[in-house]
Image: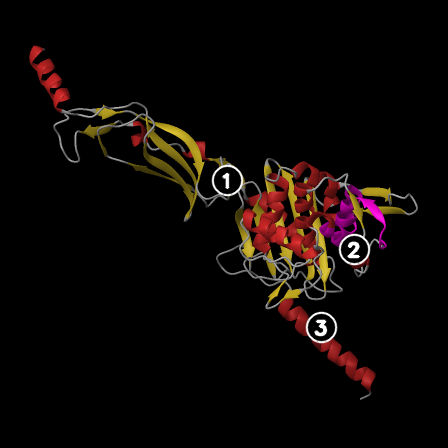
């Protein structure tokens, strides 16, 4: 057998093994049997941050150019888009995909953000990072700080463009769950969310360097924007190590979903990410509907007054009670103001009352006396605090005398 035939047989065997172990793996029995290509996948309710579906959602994997959603949001929150960016030799040396900017050229920061997101240019990413952070390393520190602030626990940024990189025993990586959290933050919670959406949804953008010597045109390559009604935004990515990756968002019928996919095929399977994204979005739209916590109501015992004693367990105070009311809604460890959740038909909101049975005088108005807990499964999503609506002064000897005299006089 000649070398050429042997190579073809080896390649065919490799491809067969790849297809066997990397495609269309059903999830476990506790989750829907969605046929997906991605090694790691998450469907998230962007408004609450609740994971509706996951496969290997906590597996830490390279994420390629999906990194750039963090690059953009850190830039929008920390810099002026009218700034002038001067290109360094390091930024100009970045490999494809690139804008082909040159050392010492100057650009408006706003224009480079379109290059970053529409064409995914790696040199623009580094030029932006050096301008905003002072260096790539300092900008990566800003990215990691932001990730921690958002609630990402298994994400580590090294580069602003998502090229494969390592730092000691750590690699540039995230999880599908963390990537979905980042996108959810970008579109629902960031003070720059509208600017983020405006840039990432733009069909095309033309600009020149500040000297006016070179002209550029960028086209949006996010096919998802024209794939489903309500598509909001998204970012593709690919490296040899990461494979095809994608994170995208959709808003329809009052529901906002984010899909994050990691290791979703390798060449020549560029379309797998679109298939998986549509599959997860359609699953979310068909199976989840909004339910407010108000619909679940409050326990009947909530408003019943609480008995006040002169001392712990002492009944000298007689029939003294203090009225109780609801104060304000408080979240239970979740970032967003959570007034409701997207739930499927099998899920229920559990309402639990935690309330003191007695109090000891003196009692001040507005004193916390418990809370109402709203949970789905084992996770608490909202609390309503209970407080006293009136005060009760100390039940001392003079108070007791007044009560006795009043009783006998009556």
Q: Is 394 placed left or right of 275 in the picture?
A: left
What's the mark number on residue 37?
A: none
Crowdedness of circle 3 by 10 Å Cα count: few (<14), some, many (20+)? few
Q: What is the basis of the colouring in this image?
A: secondary structure
The residue that disc 1 covers is 341
Residue 408 colored in magenta in the image: no
Residue drawn at x 57%, y 53% as measured from the top left: 178
The residue that disc 3 covers is 15
For residue 295, say whether it is visible. no
Dot 1 lies on which element?
strand
The image quadrant that residue 196 belongs to is top right
Q: Of residues 257 and 121, which is closer to you in this image? A: 121
Give the mark, 2 or 3, whose residue is nearer the N terminus.
Answer: 3
Q: Of residues 67 and 92, which is closer to you in this image? A: 92
What's the mark number on residue 123?
A: 2
Q: Is 319 placed left or right of 128 in the picture?
A: left
Residue drawn at x 9%, y 15% as measured from the top left: 405
């Amino acid at each position: 057998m000649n070398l050429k035939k042997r190579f073809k047989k080896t390649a065919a065997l490799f491809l067969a093994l790849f297809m066997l172990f990397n495609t269309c793996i059903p999830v476990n029995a506790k989750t829907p049997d969605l046929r997906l290509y991605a090694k790691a996948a998450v469907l998230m309710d962007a408004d609450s941050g609740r994971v509706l579906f996951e496969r290997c959602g906590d597996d830490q994997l390279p994420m390629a150019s999906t990194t750039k959603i963090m690059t953009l949001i850190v830039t929008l929150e920390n810099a002026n888009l009218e700034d002038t960016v001067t290109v360094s030799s390091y930024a100009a040396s970045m490999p494809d995909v690139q804008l082909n900017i040159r050392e010492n050229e100057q650009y408006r920061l706003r224009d480079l953000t379109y290059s970053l997101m529409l064409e995914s240019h790696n040199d623009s990413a580094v030029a932006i990072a050096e301008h905003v952070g002072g260096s790539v390393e300092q900008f990566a520190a800003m990215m990691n700080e932001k990730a921690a602030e958002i609630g990402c626990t298994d994400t580590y940024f090294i580069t602003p463009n998502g090229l494969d990189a390592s730092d000691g025993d750590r690699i540039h990586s995230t999880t599908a769950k963390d990537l979905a959290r980042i996108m959810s933050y970008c579109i629902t919670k960031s003070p720059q969310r509208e600017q983020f959406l405006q840039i990432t949804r733009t069909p095309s953008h033309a600009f020149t360097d500040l000297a006016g010597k070179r002209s550029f045109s960028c086209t949006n390559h996010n096919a998802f924007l024209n794939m489903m009604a309500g598509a909001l935004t998204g970012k593709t990515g690919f490296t040899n190590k990461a494979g095809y990756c994608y994170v995208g968002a959709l808003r329809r019928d009052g529901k906002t979903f984010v899909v994050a996919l990691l290791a979703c095929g390798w060449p020549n399977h560029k379309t797998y990410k679109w298939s998986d994204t549509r599959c997860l979005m359609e699953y979310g739209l068909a199976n989840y509907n909004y339910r407010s916590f108000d619909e679940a109501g409050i326990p009947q015992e909530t408003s019943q007054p609480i008995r006040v004693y002169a001392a712990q367990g002492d009944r000298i105070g007689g029939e003294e009670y203090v009225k109780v009311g609801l104060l304000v809604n408080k979240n239970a460890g979740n970032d967003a103001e959570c007034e409701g959740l997207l739930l499927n038909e099998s899920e229920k909101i559990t309402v639990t009352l935690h309330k003191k049975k007695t109090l000891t005088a003196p009692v001040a108005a507005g004193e916390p006396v418990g809370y109402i807990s709203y949970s789905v499964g084992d996770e608490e999503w909202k609390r309503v605090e209970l407080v006293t609506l009136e005060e009760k002064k100390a039940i001392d000897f003079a108070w007791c005398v007044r009560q006795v005299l009043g009783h006998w006089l009556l």
